[in-house]
Structure formats: structure tokens, C-alpha cells
Image (spheres, coloured by chain):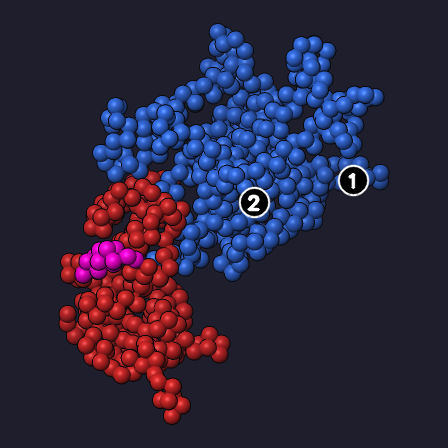
Chain colours: A blue, B red
């Protein structure tokens, strides 16, 4: 490839590359190196001034990574195949519970009864039923994807019968079925409120005591690097994300991906071109659910304890928001959307906390803090409440986050249907042509 | 042109509830022929196409492709037999680029599955490169090189029509169904399209069925013509014969009132 002329392509292979220019390849490497350094911080490289991400932030980034995997899956279904689904949380749940059944602790007693959580007379949880097969991660992680995909295949005929909004409602039904099952099957889901424990991410060959690669405890990796638990989890899950990302990109640039897009754009024309609608809608559902299943399993394993309530409608809506804000149908947009939706609330909260610390500092920042924040006292005004209990106006940060979220979705739908990816395209094209308008 | 009949439509009838859209239409297409179907608006021409590609399922009659009945097959199965078509109101995949649209036409000539696609290296990559070459040939042939990376929804109408023709050609079809290939085009675009159609016929030897309202074009390039009105066939023959047929003239220009009363 010619360095001086990045747009010169000399083969179809170069033209089909995921990162066609050296600049893009370099950017990716730069991003990965920066991210690694930021995560390792001065725990490993003493010359680095700070550990950029504390455990709270790093934990949040790991969650974002997990949600990114699930969002990639929904993008394949909604953005690429054009089938609106509100059931993504259900498929995530399917994966999570497959993981816990296959990889969870082996119950002390043989009978299934022992798996049911037991409450005493006062309704307090006395025994946490825990049953699983105790299989290693290389079985339960892929299987959670496969089982979710199978359920997706079972659901997919609905997509041939109903379209658009109706399909959204049908898939919405799945979420409620899932919640109901969570309540009805405590031997699977554990206690409805407190959930049950998930297997750790340790990589074992079989059921041996010391894992091949230790993930769930701080310690040295391969006798080389000292890492904390969250750091290890980050590297494992981020590697999984990269692989899934690569798979998704490849899918979209090959025969199956084009067939899916054809069905999205014109289903009748697609059929007349020899693309069987049913088969490819099924493929779309299966792949999308596979991603959700993997993400669900990782979510359970990373958080350690999940209750069925978490796989509810709100989670599904979160994913739809990710796609709308990021830009449905584009993989880069999906990633941007995930970052934005998952990290924005925390950014707003940290900012408010920081501002609250500046209240008495005087100067412009102190003034701004005084203007924005309020503890609800006499003559103390401001839109953001930092009082412990904040009903109604002024609203707490939590409610402000919800408002910002809702407003953003509306704004993106109206002004930038391509989402953050569209914004990025506009900025890029502006600077490409600068100082000419085009 | 030979006498080898490749497509035989035999007495098909298509009803939507009480409306009979096609009423006993029969015709055949021989190898290498350019057959035209004409008729006033709402005569059922496009319904005939939709019946051949089995988007609509006629209640009566039979449609045979090289002796094999198409009735009851799925549209994609019909496409797999080598029958391609274009649409009256362009039905391109709007958000995909020109290259991707035409590559989608190659779908039936490729066979990598989702797993091959996901791992890319190996089958998918090889297949993509080979078929991309074929797509570039078609792009050259239709002279749409400058548009190849554009999402088709952004392209001018005339170019979109060409891309659609290209997508159908990419299927390497044996029969091409063209639904109003020059509808809404200006004189120059019509002439370009007519040249492409003749080139396809002469260079690639693909048989074609064409629905068209542009009588000048039809009379110039069609070998034989079927005229339908209100779903009924009212005449088949060479362009000169059809032009002279009084029923055809009546269908297009109307008859005198006295005739109808009588």
C-alpha cells in the first residue's frame, strides 16, 4: 500500500479491508496501547504518574465492554437485518442462566430440592440454594451463546409473520416470560430479589483446584505482571470483545451480511434475488442472540450475583438507546453508543461530586457549583439536588441522568438519525475538505 | 433464436378476492428471444411477472421453466433456477453501495455460509475476491464506474435503473424479466438503456421478457409481443401484427361508444 496515497487501492483485497489505511491501522494500535497503559497504570509501570482508572472506573469499563458485546449482537439484528427486537435482555438472561447452570457451584446435596433458596418464618433468606455442574469456562461460555442462539432460532419464525412495531411487541413478550420464569424457577434463578452466585472467570482445564489462568484473585500473571482482579477481568473480557468485533465486521462484509442487509432494505426484492427471507431472519436472530448470550454469561460472572429482575425491559431499552444514539447499522456507531450510554451517567455523577467539593472554594468554579447545586435549604436554589433525599424539584443526579438520556434519544432521532457515527462522519468530511466546503 | 421453449406460461389465472388480476394468460419464451408484454395501466402485466417469480401464486394454470413447473416454489428457489428480474418502482437495497447491491446479485452464485463469513480467511475471502471481479465487469459494462462506492439511495433515477439491471445481470441469469426498464427516463437515458438491452441479448445471449409502455422502444427491439387488457390476453404476435390488430387499437385508444352499446 502506498503511504503517500492512502486512497489508492491496488487489489480488491485492499478495498475490502476492515482498516484500509495505515492511519487507521496505526490509530487502532495506538488506542490499544494507550488503553493497556491506562488500565495497568503505575501498578506495573512505575514511571506512570497515576493509575488512570481506579477499581470503580475500571469496573464500569468492564461492564461497558460486556454491554458492547451485547449491543454488537443487537446491531446485527436491528441495524443490519432490520428486525426490531425488545427481547435482547431475555437472550442475555438466557445466556447468563445457562452459564450459572453449567458453571455454577456443585450443590452439596444431590436432589434438586436443595437448589431452592429457603426462607425462615420471618421471610429472611436462610439458605441460598446453589446448584450447578461446576464445568470450566471453555464449556459454559460458548454454551451460553449457543443456548441463547437456539432460543433465538425458535423465536425467529415470528419475524417472518409480523414486522416492525408488531415484532417489537412480540419480542417484548419474551422479556416478561423471562421474568416470570425467573420467579417460578428458583432452583435455576435463585432468590428472586437477591439472585444467586455466578461462576468466576478463572480458566480451568477441567474441575481442578488451581486454575490454569487465575482471574478471580489479585496476583501475578504468568509470574510476570502483578494485576488486580478487575484488571485481569478487563483483559479477558476486552479480548473477547475484540474477537466478537472482528467476527461482526467480517459477517457484514461477506455474503451472509449482505443478504441480511438486503432483507432490511427490501425483503421482497431480496427474495427475488435468491435470498430466502426465513433462513436469513433466522440467521440474524441466532447470531444476535449468540452475542447476547455470551454477554449475559460474562455479565453474571463479572458481577458475581445477578437477580432475574436485572434482565428486564429497561435493559432491552438500554440497548435500543445504544443503537439509536450510536447509529444503527454501523459497528463503529454501536461501540460509540455503548461508551456514551454506559459511561455518561457516571461522568455526570462524578462531575457533580467534584462540583460539590468545590462549593466553598470561591472563584468561578465555586460560583458555578453554588449556582447548579442545592441542598434544599432556604434561599438555596439550583437545579441539581445533592441532599440525601430529593423528592421532586430540584432533582437528584440520578433523575437528571434519566432526563439527559431521554432528551438525547429524542434529539438524535430528530437531528441525526445516523447517531454519533453520523456526527463523526460530518466532522471528518468537514476536515477532509477544509478549507473548501466540499 | 431457436424454437427451444424455455418458459411456458399456460392459462394462468390470478385472483385477489373478487378481483381477477390475470385471466387465462398464456405465452411462451424461446431461447434468446426478447419477448414484450404490453397493455394499458392496470392490465396485469406486472402481476404476470410476479406470478413467474412466484411472489404471487396464481390459482389456476401452470408456469414451466424448461419443463419444470414453478408453481408453489418460493421466490428464492425461482431465482436459483436462473430467473432474474428488475422492478417497476426501483427495488434496490437503498443503504448499500452500488458494489454491495450488485454483489448481492451474486448471492446465488456464491455459497459461503455465515461461519465462513465470520472467520473471513479462507473461503469467504477467496469468494469475495472472485465475485468482486465479476461485479467490476458488470460495472464497466453499464458504465457506472464513478458511482460504485455510493449508497444507491443517493443516486439519480436513471443510474439507479442501471444498477438494478446490473444486480439482475450479476445473477448470471438465463432469463431476465425487465419491468418497465425505461419508465420515467428522458430520451437519452432511454437510448442508453435500449443499447444495454440489445447488448445483453447479443453479447450474453440472455432471453428476456420486458414490460414496457414506451411503444417506440417495444416495437423497435421486441421479437414478439403479448398484449393484455383487464387481465385478458388480446393478442400475440410480431410487432407489425400487433400494431395492426383492431382489438389492440381498441384497448389503447378506446372504442366508439356506439360499438360498446351494441
Image coordinates of residue A162 in percent, x first then y, are 53, 58
Q: Is residue B124 above or below residue B75?
A: above
Secondary-structure class at tag 2: helix
> Image quadrant for the C terminus of chain A?
top left
Chain containing mark 1? A
Q: Which residue is most to the bottom? A: B262
Name of the residue lying farthest toward the top = A47
**Can you identify the residue that label 1 sits on?**
A119
Residue tagged 2: A88
Is residue A410 at all visible to an observer of this figure? yes
In the figure, is residue A251 to the left or right of A392? left
Mark 2 Cα-neighbour bin, 10 Å: few <14, some 14–19, many ≥20: many
Would you say B54 lies left or right of A343 here? left
Task: Report, in whole angstroms, how far the alpha carbon at label 1 lies from the one at label 2.
Answer: 32 Å
Q: Nearer the viewer, residue B181 or A313?
A: B181
Q: Secondary structure at mark 1?
A: strand
Bounds of the magenta span? B185-198
Residue A418, image x, y percentages: 47, 39
Question: Residue A230 sits in which quadrant?
Answer: top right
Q: Chain of mark 2?
A: A
Q: Is residue A252 above or below residue A240?
A: below
Residue A117 drawn above or below residue A180: above
The residue sitting at 60% across, 42% down in the picture is A317
Q: Is residue A120 left or right of residue A372?
A: right
Is there CB contact under 8 Å for labels 1 and 2?
Answer: no
In-front residue for pair A271/B220? B220
Q: Nearer the viewer, mark 1 or mark 2?
A: 2
Query: Residue B192 magenta-drawn?
Result: yes
**Left or right: A60 with respect to B48?**
right
Q: Residue at x 15, y 70 (%)?
A: B1
Quarter of the figure with the N terminus of chain A:
top left
Amino acid at each position: 500500500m502506498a503511504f503517500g496515497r492512502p486512497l489508492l487501492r491496488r487489489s480488491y483485497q485492499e478495498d475490502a479491508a476492515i482498516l484500509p489505511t495505515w492511519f487507521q491501522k496505526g490509530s487502532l494500535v495506538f488506542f490499544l496501547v494507550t488503553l493497556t497503559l491506562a488500565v495497568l497504570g503505575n501498578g506495573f509501570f512505575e514511571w506512570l504518574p497515576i493509575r488512570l482508572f481506579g477499581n470503580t472506573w475500571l469496573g464500569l469499563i468492564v461492564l461497558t465492554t460486556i454491554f458492547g458485546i451485547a449491543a454488537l449482537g443487537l446491531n446485527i439484528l436491528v441495524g443490519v437485518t432490520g428486525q426490531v427486537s425488545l427481547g435482547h435482555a431475555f437472550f442475555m438472561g438466557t445466556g447468563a442462566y445457562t452459564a450459572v447452570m453449567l458453571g455454577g457451584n456443585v450443590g452439596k446435596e444431590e436432589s434438586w430440592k436443595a437448589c431452592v433458596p429457603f426462607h425462615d418464618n420471618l421471610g429472611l433468606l436462610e439458605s441460598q440454594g446453589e446448584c450447578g455442574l461446576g464445568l470450566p469456562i471453555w464449556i459454559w461460555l460458548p454454551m451460553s451463546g449457543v443456548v441463547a442462539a437456539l432460543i433465538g432460532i425458535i423465536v425467529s419464525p415470528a419475524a417472518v409473520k409480523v414486522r416492525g412495531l408488531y415484532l417489537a411487541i412480540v419480542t417484548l413478550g419474551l422479556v416478561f416470560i423471562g421474568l416470570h420464569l425467573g420467579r417460578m424457577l428458583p432452583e435455576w434463578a435463585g432468590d428472586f430479589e437477591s439472585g444467586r452466585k455466578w461462576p468466576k472467570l478463572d480458566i480451568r482445564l477441567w474441575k481442578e483446584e488451581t486454575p490454569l489462568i487465575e482471574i478471580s484473585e489479585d496476583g501475578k500473571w504468568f509470574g510476570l505482571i502483578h494485576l488486580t482482579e478487575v484488571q485481569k477481568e478487563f483483559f479477558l473480557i476486552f479480548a473477547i470483545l475484540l474477537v466478537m468485533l472482528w467476527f461482526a465486521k467480517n459477517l457484514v462484509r461477506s455474503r451472509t451480511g449482505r443478504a441480511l442487509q438486503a432483507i432490511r432494505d427490501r425483503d421482497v426484492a431480496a427474495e427475488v434475488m435468491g435470498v430466502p427471507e426465513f433462513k436469513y431472519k433466522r440467521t440474524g436472530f441466532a447470531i444476535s442472540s449468540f452475542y447476547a448470550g455470551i454477554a449475559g454469561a460474562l455479565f453474571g460472572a463479572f458481577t458475581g450475583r445477578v437477580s432475574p429482575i436485572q434482565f428486564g425491559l429497561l435493559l432491552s431499552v438500554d440497548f435500543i438507546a445504544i443503537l439509536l444514539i450510536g447509529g444503527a447499522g454501523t459497528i463503529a456507531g454501536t461501540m460509540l453508543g455503548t461508551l456514551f450510554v454506559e459511561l455518561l451517567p457516571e461522568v455526570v455523577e462524578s462531575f457533580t461530586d467534584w462540583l460539590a467539593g468545590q462549593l466553598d472554594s470561591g472563584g468561578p468554579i465555586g460560583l458555578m457549583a453554588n449556582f447548579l447545586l442545592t441542598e434544599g435549604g432556604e434561599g438555596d436554589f439550583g437545579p441539581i439536588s445533592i441532599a440525601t433525599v430529593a423528592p421532586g424539584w430540584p432533582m437528584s443526579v440520578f433523575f437528571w441522568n434519566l432526563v439527559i438520556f431521554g432528551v438525547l434519544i429524542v434529539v438524535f432521532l430528530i437531528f441525526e438519525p445516523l447517531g454519533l457515527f453520523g456526527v463523526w462522519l460530518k466532522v471528518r468530511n468537514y476536515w477532509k475538505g477544509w478549507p473548501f466546503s466540499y | 433464436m431457436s424454437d427451444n421453449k424455455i418458459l411456458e406460461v399456460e392459462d394462468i389465472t390470478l385472483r385477489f378476492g373478487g378481483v381477477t388480476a390475470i385471466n387465462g394468460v398464456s405465452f411462451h419464451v424461446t431461447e434468446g428471444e426478447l419477448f414484450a408484454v404490453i397493455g394499458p395501466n392496470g392490465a396485469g402485466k406486472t402481476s404476470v411477472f410476479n406470478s413467474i417469480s412466484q411472489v404471487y401464486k396464481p390459482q389456476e394454470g401452470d408456469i414451466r421453466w424448461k419443463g419444470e413447473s414453478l408453481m408453489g416454489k418460493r421466490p428464492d428457489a425461482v431465482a436459483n433456477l436462473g430467473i432474474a428480474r428488475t422492478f417497476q418502482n426501483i427495488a434496490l437495497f437503498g443503504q448499500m453501495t452500488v458494489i454491495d447491491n450488485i454483489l448481492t446479485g451474486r448471492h446465488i452464485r456464491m455459497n459461503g455460509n455465515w461461519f465462513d463469513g465470520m472467520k473471513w480467511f479462507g473461503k469467504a475471502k477467496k469468494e469475495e475476491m472472485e465475485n468482486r471481479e465479476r461485479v467490476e465487469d458488470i460495472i464497466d459494462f453499464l458504465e457506472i464506474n464513478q458511482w460504485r462506492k455510493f449508497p444507491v439511495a443517493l443516486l439519480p433515477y436513471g443510474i439507479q435503473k442501471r444498477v438494478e439491471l446490473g444486480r439482475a445481470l450479476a445473477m448470471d441469469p438465463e432469463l431476465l424479466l425487465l419491468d418497465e426498464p425505461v419508465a420515467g427516463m428522458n430520451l437519452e437515458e432511454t437510448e442508453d438503456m435500449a443499447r444495454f438491452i440489445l447488448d445483453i441479448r447479443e453479447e450474453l445471449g440472455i432471453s428476456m421478457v420486458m414490460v414496457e409502455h414506451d411503444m417506440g422502444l417495444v416495437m423497435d427491439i421486441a421479437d414478439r409481443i403479448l398484449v393484455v387488457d383487464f387481465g385478458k390476453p388480446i393478442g400475440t404476435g410480431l410487432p407489425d401484427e400487433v400494431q395492426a390488430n383492431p382489438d389492440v387499437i381498441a384497448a389503447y385508444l378506446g372504442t366508439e361508444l356506439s360499438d360498446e352499446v351494441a
